Image (cartoon, rainbow, N blue to C red):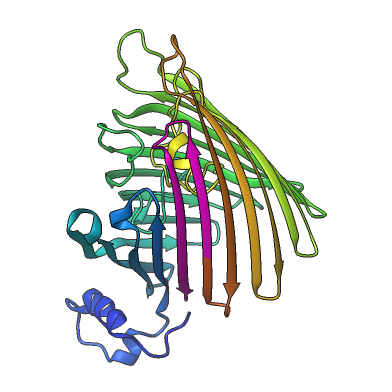
Amino acid sequence: MKLAKLSLAAIVAVGTMTSFASATPLEEAIKGVELNGMLRYRWYNESDIPTASNRYRLSSAFGFTIPVADNFTAKVGLETNHNDLTKVDGSAAQNLSYSTWDLTYKTADYSVAFGRMALNTPWTDPGFGGSRGTGLLAMYTGVEGWAFAAAAFNDTANANAGLAGIDANDLYAGAAIGSVGPVNLQFWAAKMVDVFDSSYFAQADMKFEGFSVKGQFNVLELANVAAGAEDTGLFWGIEAGFGMEGFQVGAGYTQNDDEMPIYTLNADDAGMIKAGKQIYYNTVNALDAETMFVKAGYSFDQYRFGVGYVSSEINVGTTAAPVSYDMDEIYFDLGYKYSKNLDFSAYYSIYDGDAATDENNELRFQAMYKF
């Protein structure tokens, strides 16, 4: 989105970049500046938290891309968040932060960026309020259809929510992403100091005449495990679907390791196959978790409807003395795309586990404007 006029937030951002430079006319300072981002409102109702049965969250993100010189661009990201938890603990979380910033040098075949960036890997959550790190990211795109990346980050934040009691640390990663004929491929390798010694992720997916299929696996080796404990585990999953004339159906299966189940650093990570609206958060990194899911939907004009069913089984005991725990979820969702930028959506999820108290009906409404 090219800026013909600047909002107050944009003026502040550009002013930050130029406050120590010689005075520049405003029209020249904003020439070529691009703005993108989102405004999002969410409202929740949950049956198992009566005191929080009606709560909301207001979020916004603004990204400014500023041309600095030939081949150089600067990016600044701002995030605001108001998470209404007053009915739960008497407090409300509110903040305004510089979520990301970086300086990038780019040519036709490669780019190098330095700064604070979203950690966009299969193991981390690069979304709003997600995993961030300060460091260096280099990419090479000189091979047609392929991109090769290498990154090193320290001062990581929100990058290890999936492992309780272990702090996030320096992260090193490399990736090759491309295609061979109709098949898209991804290969990743990473290490996080004092968290995991190595992790390898691979994914293959393709679409053909309405059919789609995706398979992925991840091997992760934890660091600093107790003597005699298993330190390496495998996660794998497969998902397939078919769509025609507005109708879509799909099904999938995922399996966690039965001895060392850790495969992701954050339950909200963008990389792994997920199922359902609620059940996923109880199966992520769970011992010997098996999840099967089916879903169907229909869309026409600006409207869309969907339904899904998820069944999971995890081990809540130990490898030596397994105790099976079953969970099920049924959900219904719908959406209305009012315009190219404005979208409304809602879902109703019914979750039930083996324990009498482990059940929750969740209703969520969302309005999102992207620009």
Residue at the spot 45% in from the left edge and 54% down from the top edge: 362
Most common secondary structure along the magenta stretch: strand
Res. 24 visible in picture: yes
Residue at the spot 64% in from the left edge and 58% down from the top edge: 306
Residue at the spot 42% in from the left edge and 71% down from the top edge: 38
Query: Is residue 52 part of the magenta span, yes or no?
Result: no
Percent coordinates x, y for residue 120 in the rendering: 44, 49
- Residue 192 vs 99, above or below: the answer is above
- Left or right: 200 as drawn, with respect to 57: right
Percent coordinates x, y for residue 326 in the rendering: 52, 30
The image quarter containing residue 340 is bottom right
- Left or right: 357 as drawn, with respect to 25: right
- Residue 132 vs 93, above or below: the answer is above
The magenta segment: 346-371
Percent coordinates x, y for residue 213 in the rendering: 71, 44
Give 20 or 223, whichever is nearer the viewer: 223
Percent coordinates x, y for residue 351 in the rendering: 49, 44
Give 250 or 350, whichever is nearer the viewer: 350
Give 140 or 190, whichever is nearer the viewer: 190
Query: Is residue 363 part of the magenta span, yes or no?
Result: yes
The image quarter containing residue 123 is top left
Res. 214 visible in picture: no
- Left or right: 84 as drawn, with respect to 303: left
